[in-house]
Amino acid sequence: MRILTSSVGRKILMSITGQLLILFILIHLIGNSTIFFGPNGINAYAEHLHSLPPLVWAFRLFMGAAIAVHICYGVMLTLENKAANPGAYAVKKNLKASFASENMIWTGLLVLAFIVYHLLQFTVHGTPDVVIGLDSANRPDVFRMVVTSFGNGLIALAYVFAMIMLFLHLSHGIPSFLQTMGWNNEKTIPAFGTGGKVISAVLMLAYISIPAVILAGLLKL
């Protein structure tokens, strides 16, 4: 298919999968935010997810495929851009170069590394900081698991760093998507650039708020 072989087609696929990942980030944030309702909030949410294994696994496989496509074409396009323009990451036409735009490949890879660690931690339960148990209602005690993990300053700091990398990646990725799809022009570029930064900042701060309130002692066992 031409869309898989042409540079424009690959950029479109990378942009679309990127927006699917932003949708997942938003959905994941909504689920994580149930921790602010205490043990019953997040534990009930987790129990509900565990009661829908076919749907959850289908969603995981779909998002895994989206991540794979996004990474594959992201790396491919970066290598092509560097070959055509050695020494610099090619910034899309009409978008000003910035730290975020020039380091998309690195912020993306750092976010990927965090995703792998995050899955090992809270999904596979393969890191030593994870406390596994049941709450008083005989449900997986996700609240205790999260609070004890983020109570470790180094783990919380790593999480904050990952969210900053996510902010940098999205702050360029969102307006870049609009550029790729041809939905902006000279007049709207500044507004879309600002909008991308605002959306990215809101997501970053919302995610960071979870370890922040735990470290501050506002959420505790």
Image (cartoon, grey):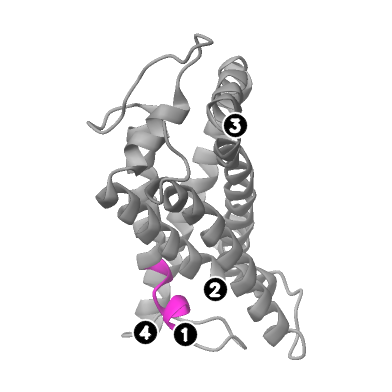
Q: Which callout, 2 or 3, points at the residue further toward the start of the chain?
A: 3
**Residue 54 placement: quadrant:** top right
Query: What residue is rendered at 47% in x and 40% in y?
Result: 219
Give the magenta-colored segment's residue range: 99-105
**Residue lying at 46% horizontally and 46% vertically, measured from the top left:** 68
Q: Amino acid at mark 4?
A: Ala
Marks 1 and 4: which is nearer the front?
Answer: 1
Label 1 amino acid?
Ser
**Looking at the image, do the residues carrying marks 2 and 3 touch, with CB atoms under 8 Å apart?**
no
Residue 123 appears at what percent x and percent y? 41, 29
Report x, y in % for residue 220.
Answer: 42, 36
> At 41% from the left edge and 61% from the top edge, which residue is drawn?
108
User: Looking at the image, is mark 1 or mark 4 earlier in the sequence?
Assistant: 4
Labels 2 and 4 touching (C-beta < 8 A): no
Q: Residue at x 46, y 50 (%)?
A: 213
Residue occupied by mark 1: 98
